[in-house]
Amino acid sequence: MAFFLFVTPAHSRIYEEPNWSERHPIPITGRKNIYSIDDTDEWAEVVRKGRIHALVYPVEVTGMLVPYQALENFFESKPSNPIHRFFQKIAGKIAGFYSLQDMYSWVGVHEYPVDDSNEIPFPDGHRPSYPMGVSLIDTHDGLGLSFSCATCHSANLFGQKVLGLTNRLPKANDFFVLGTKAVKLMPKSLFKAISNADSGELNMYKRLRRNSRRVGATKPLNNSLDTSLAQVALSLAKRKRDSWASRSTVREKFPRSERLRHHRADSKPAPWWNVKYKNRFLLDGSVVSGNPIFTNFLWNEIGRGADLGEIDNWLYENQEKVQELTAAVFATEAPRATEFFDESHFDLAKAKRGQSIYIALCSRCHGTYKKAWERDDAQSLSTLDAIETTAVHYNENTLVIDVGTDLSRALGMQTLGPELNRLEISKNNNTLVRPQNGYVPPPLVGIWARWPYLHNNSIPSLCALLTRSEDRPKAYYFGESISKEEDFDFECNGYPSGEGTPRSWIDKKSVFSTQKESLSNSGHDLKIFLEKNGSEKLTRAEKLDLIHFLQTL
């Protein structure tokens, strides 16, 4: 087993790496404390630092850094230079950015909470003026702007910021598409003229332009989805096919043929709290060996045009940061519905009926959940205490099952997997990808907060999920979860529909269409909620009982 040296100002520790193999059975209660750190205070500090890395990207040698001060000069100043004024107007009309705050809002990042906390700590001890995910990295060439894990893995849930929850409206991929086009069209001399960049910032911009030529960015089919799978594959197609995916000026102009250039494999960013229960990772379970957080760093940097030798050296020299982020992700807990809805929303008898249905229909794939109402002293508990989940019993070995859902995401890994496996950086970190024929049936902890459903967001609510696939909505409107009353259907658990759809969503034309390639909402019904002959197993009342039980997980 590997050992990493962890260094802090106060102490040094060597943490043994866990067994990352798919053949290593996971305790049915999961691996929340992934490094088995006995000292409670020490573990809490490691997790806190990891959450800061999630909020502020720690890779100083990342492939794409935008000169921050120059960018601020461009957007925030009132220039006398007519060229600068002209491009400010052009940027505003084309991209809709008239300020840095406009840009952050467009990307979809969320403001920090008002108060510092263990769940979302302030990076420098004070509340940043910029949103979560925005990363200002100090380099020898000046301050560079990048985006961190929190860009896609944090959300505003009815006014509460949740780190590790899927961002429902991420535009990180769109930002790469827009950014690489802008950089390609803007030579260094023009950049200097419109931003007053100094020599260091011009060096940073030169590196940004060089690396952007290796970025194969593509827009997702819907702005609620992420297209990192395609971005990684298309970026690798712009490099040599050697073990370090070296730079090739020829390939940058004439990329290799790649299936994901035309085959769409868009998916949602997954929530973090499920990883503690698994020994295969990603939505399709295709990462079967190696630390899954390493996969995040590798994919990020391939998609940012980085030199993989530099990234490999960074990983070796910063193993403590990798461990800290890993500890934070595995320690993430799902938000409970009872944190957002009062006791009047919960019916103990209804939840108990739903549990019986769940055990009969769902538990084989999704695990079982011990409830406080099963305790000997349950009679003395309030409803909110009684519905608490006291233990999660998930499969010791992570399942991958084809239940008829759209296979585009899983099929997309068939060509990308071998390309990742041949890389020396993957071998150095014992990372192995094995394409799968299906998806992982995840633990259902926090399932209430994870709408819309399926890997491709094609189902707006649990009511729709429990409907035969041909009768599910062909399209739906979507938006942020700001108001519990207007933006959420509690009974069906998900996006409101029909007359309940918020007017602002309709005005913005925020529509998800399941008729597009790779966005099918089929599957997960026959032999699950439907009999072999296609008849319904559950009445509407039974479906609502099941949904109510799921809301207590």
Image (tube, helix red, strand yellow):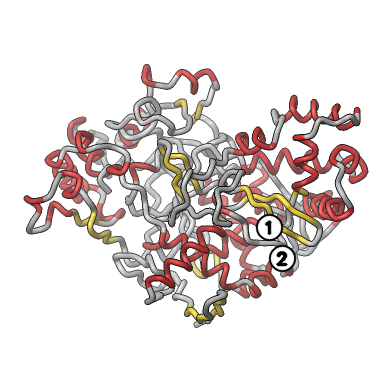
Give the number of the disc on residue 302.
Answer: 1
Q: Residue at x 49, y 19 (%)?
A: 506
Label 2: element kind? helix
| Amino acid on which disc 1 is placed | Ile
The answer, for residue 341, to whether it is visible in the render is yes
Query: Is residue 540 rendered to the left or right of residue 483?
Result: left
Q: Residue at x 34, y 45 (%)?
A: 447
Residue that numbered label 2 is attached to: 308
| Residue 384 versus residue 78 in the image, above or below | below
- Image marks 2 and 1: residues in contact by CB distance under 8 Å: yes
Tell me where residue 193 appears, x and y as whole percent.
90, 39
Query: Is residue 534 rendered to the left or right of residue 44?
Result: left
Q: Residue at x 75, y 63 (%)?
A: 307
Sooner in the amino-acid sequence: mark 2 or mark 1 = 1
At label 1, counting other C-alpha atoms closer than 10 Å, the crowd grade (few under 14, some 14-19, many 20 or more) is many
Query: Is residue 344 rendered to the left or right of residue 41?
Result: left
Q: Residue at x 45, y 44 (%)?
A: 161
Q: CA distance from mark 2 to mark 1?
A: 7 Å
Q: Nearer the viewer, residue 249 or 126?
A: 126
Label 1: element kind? helix
